[in-house]
Amino acid sequence: MDNINIFLKYFSRVLVLLLIFPLCDVARGVAARWMGDDTAERSGRLTLNPISHLDPIGSILILLIGFGWTKPMPINYRNMRDPRKGVLLTSVAAPAALLISGLVCNLISNLLLCLDSVYNSATFNIGLCVYILLGFISRISVCLAVLFLLPIPPMDGFYILKHFAGDKFERWYYSNQQNINIVALIILILLFTLPSQINPLDYLINFVDGLLGRVFSWIPAVRWK
């Protein structure tokens, strides 16, 4: 059983590479296109074909540790009707796609729990394997969404913060950009190396994961009431 769990864990990361990452990039590109910039579309990036999106190093890391990245999405904010709003929408797009992915996986998982072969199974079967696989994908999606929403550069959350903080904050950032980026790198390294017992990122991921887990938890509860 442990071998099957390990296989499903790494297989879920392959599916994230092939399905979830392209979805995130397309979400960014569609948001940019909606705001008037067709750079991603002209670059052939508005496609769910993973070959168009995957970065070699980011892909290897997602397979090894569950965190990685894709090729930078070509976006030209100067082409947008409202560049400031465009930065906000394109920054929100990928984390939103990841959270939706987590919700969909959670919904299907709870529907599977309505099956006796999954809910009461003591041995592996197809339904139980799919249930475990969806749990892994949901967890990775939530982890990536929380990471992307961190309010430090170069994460999406920083650009969302910059949008709402106003011009004064933006001028302060650009005048201290190098030092801020160094501090941000140190913070990211600490978040990836601190033990989970004292890691605030782990607590935040578990909190968001728990919230998503409760959205559809009533489905099997009603079934087995």
Image (cartoon, rainbow, N blue to C red):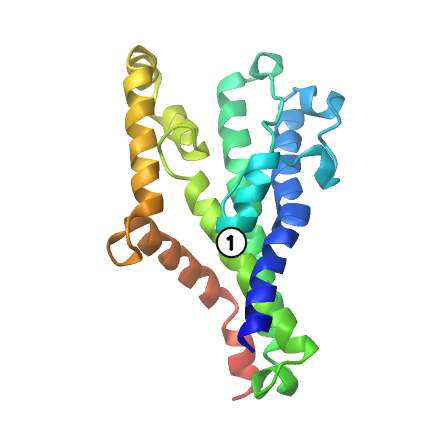
The answer to whether 215 appears left or right of 206 in the picture is right
Q: Residue at x 61, y 27 (%)?
A: 73
> Along the line of sight, which residue is nearer the eye, 125 or 30?
125
Assign the N terminus to one quadrant of the image. Answer: bottom right
Q: Which residue is mark 1?
A: 140
The answer to whether 92 appears left or right of 74 in the picture is left
Q: Residue at x 55, y 30 (%)?
A: 90
How many residues crowd mark 1 within 10 Å: few (<14), some (14–19), many (20+)? Answer: many
> Along the line of sight, which residue is nearer the eye, 208 or 59?
59
Residue 94 visible (yes or no): yes
The answer to whether 194 appears left or right of 47 in the picture is left
Q: Position of residue 14 (x, y in %)?
A: 64, 52
Above or below 130: residue 166? above
- Dividing the picture into quarters, in which one does residue 46 lie? top right
Residue 66 visible (yes or no): no
Q: Position of residue 56 (x, y in %)?
A: 61, 35
Q: Residue at x 60, y 72 (%)?
A: 4
Above or below 103: residue 118? below
Q: Position of residue 166 (x, y in %)?
A: 34, 20
- Dividing the picture into quarters, in which one does residue 108 lie? bottom right
Farthest front residue in view:
3
Farthest left residue in view:
198
